[in-house]
Amino acid sequence: MSSSLNRLAVYCGSASPSDPRYIELARDVGRGLAERGIGVVYGGGRLGLMGAVAAGALEAGGEVIGVIPEALAGSEVANRDCTELFTVGGMHERKQRFTDLSDGFVTIPGGVGTMDELWEAVSWSQLGYHTKPVGLLNAFGFYDHLIAFNRHMAEVGFVRPAHQGIIIADKTLPELLDKMAAYQPHTPIFQMKASDL
C-alpha cells in the first residue's frame, strides 16, 4: 500500500437499510482500513453506515477522526468514541475539513448527502482544488447505474477525456485501495488552455 494513503475520508449513509449487508460492509471497510494502517476521516455520526465504519475501525485499533456540523453535534448523533471529533459550522466547512485531513476519498453506499460529498470531491478534482484519488466502492452493484451515468456524461461530452478517470471504482476494498494508491493526477481545468476546454 502506498504510504501516501495515511488517511482516507469515507463517505457513506447515516441510515441503516433493512438489508444487513450494508452495515456489515461499512464495518468491514472501517476494519479493513485500520488493518492497513489507514486512518478514517468521516462524518462524525454514530448512526447507520457512518457509525459502523467508525466502530469497525476503532475495534481494529485504527484512528477515527469525525467532522460533524454543530446542528448535528448536539442532537446525540455525534460519536464521542472517535479518536478526535471536530465540530464545524456547516456542511461546506465539513467537506473542506474532509479534504484537508485526508489523502483521498472512498465512497461506499449512501444517499443524497453521500452523493453530494462524492460529486464535490470529483468536481474539486476536475478543477484542481485537490489532486487526491476519489474511490467508489461498488459493493453489491450498488453504484452500477451511477458508473453508467458517469460514462454517459463522458460520451455526450460533459466530462473531458482528461477527467474520465477521476472516479476510481472497484467491487472490493483491497483492489480499490490498490488502484487509489497507483492514481496519477490528471491535468486540472485550472491548468488547461482555452483550446482544451
Image: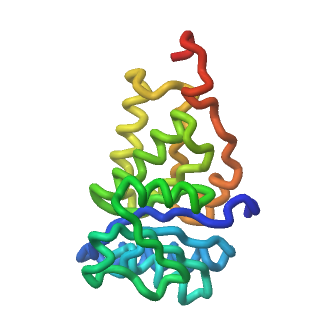
Tell me, what colour scheme is on the image? rainbow
78, above or below 127, in the image: below
Residue sitting nearer the eye, 54 or 44 = 44
Give the percent coordinates (x, y) of residue 191.
Answer: 62, 25
80, above or below 32, in the image: below
Q: Quadrant of the N terminus?
A: bottom right
Residue sitting nearer the eye, 132 or 23 = 132
Residue found 76% across the figure and 62% down from its top: 3
Give the percent coordinates (x, y) of residue 163.
Answer: 54, 32
Instruction: State the count of labels.
Output: 0
Give the percent coordinates (x, y) of residue 57.
Answer: 54, 81
118, above or below 25, in the image: above
Give the percent coordinates (x, y) of residue 187.
Answer: 63, 30
Residue found 45% across the figure and 28% down from its top: 159
Image quarter of residue 48? bottom left
Residue found 47% across the figure and 43% down from its top: 122
Q: Is residue 135 left or right of residue 37?
A: left
87, above or below 5, in the image: below
Residue found 52% across the figure and 68% down from its top: 41
Residue sitting nearer the eye, 192 or 184 = 192
Q: Give the residue at the far right of this rendering.
A: 3
Q: Give the residue at the far top of this rendering.
A: 195
